[in-house]
Image (tube, rainbow, N blue to C red):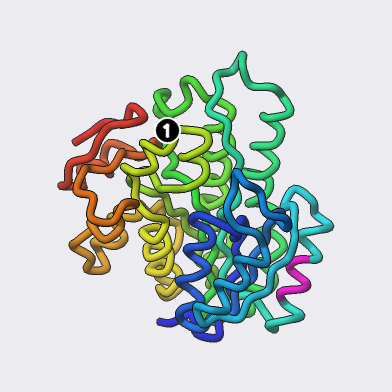
Amino acid sequence: MSLANKTVVITGGTRGIGLAIALRAASDGANVVILGKTVDPDPRLPGTLSSAAAEIEAAGGSALAVQTDIRSEEQVDAAVAAAVDRFGGIDVLVNNASAISLTPTEATPMKRYDLMQQVNARGTFLMSQKCIPHLKKSDNAHILTLSPPLDIDPKWFKGHVAYTMAKMGMSMCTLGMAAEFADDGIAVNSLWPLTTIDTAAIRNLLGGDAMAARSRSPRVMADAAYAVVTQPSRECTGNFFIDELVLKEAGVTDFAEYAAVPGDTEPPFLDFFVPAEMLRQVESDYVDAFGAQSN
């Protein structure tokens, strides 16, 4: 299948993985609606709504950029209405926007706790809720949430309970909504990276430039997302996908092209939240950065 003339709504679409997914959809000639908060350039964070829209148009898509705080029901209502008014409907929702703070319990201010819950779990629920009436009208409707496989191993919670709760809340939306809307033909899946991805979060909050250089480009997630949302929706729902495994299933054998630094042959860092049984399906060597079990 192709995303030509399909309407794809992406939260947090101004940079990183969200923008990469937007550009992959645009290359098919999709209508891409990006929701984000960044209007003015920020030296710490590349990309604005206007710059992302320009890139989408240059890649072959039709762009609509809507300044939206997904914590606000009123703003989400307005953004969804704008998407439908401009393009006539919605075919794909990508819940990409997320807040992160890898802080232990005693060092997590409630303001930061609330932000993660409101953006991650509540934002995913709210965006999905508002898009579902329109997705029901699509002939191949997908909700794809960038959240990890549900795994309650304490190692994923220890040290950052609040963040893990918020991310797993996104995954619980996938679990429940996949079952709830199966009869409506809406596919609901999650996608998570096997390795760290070169994003602002890695550069500014986690491992800095050194870790970013040993990560993969956001394109690996974009290609995996594309492979998922172009599947027949009634045949592909309720899954917790890992990007590399999705792409291997699609026939990709050379992942060197996804290196953040072109030509780099050093093994990338494993991301966290990857269950051991999924790691056992991976044959390549990786560096254990976050305490993940290596195979």
Residue type at mark 1: give it: Gly
Up-down relation of residue 207 to residue 147 (above or below):
above
What percent of the width, then of the height, locates residue 159? Answer: 49, 20
What percent of the width, then of the height, locates residue 137? Answer: 64, 79
Residue shown at 40%/73% (left/top)? 231
Residue shown at 37%/39% (left/top)? 271
Between 161 and 109, the one lying in front of the other is 109
Q: Image check: 165 left or right of 130?
A: left
For residue 196, what is the image quadrant? top left
Between 243 and 171, the one lying in front of the other is 243
Q: Which residues are magenta?
A: 79-83
Toward the front, the furthest residue is 43
Between 204 and 170, the one lying in front of the other is 204
Image quarter of the C terminus: top left
Disc 1 on helix, strand or loop? loop
For residue 155, what is the image quadrant? top left
Image quarter of the N terminus: bottom left
Up-down relation of residue 12 to residue 274 (above or below):
below
Q: Which residue is mark 1?
A: 207
Q: Name the main secondary structure of what is drawn in magenta.
A: helix
What percent of the width, then of the height, locates residue 65? Answer: 69, 68
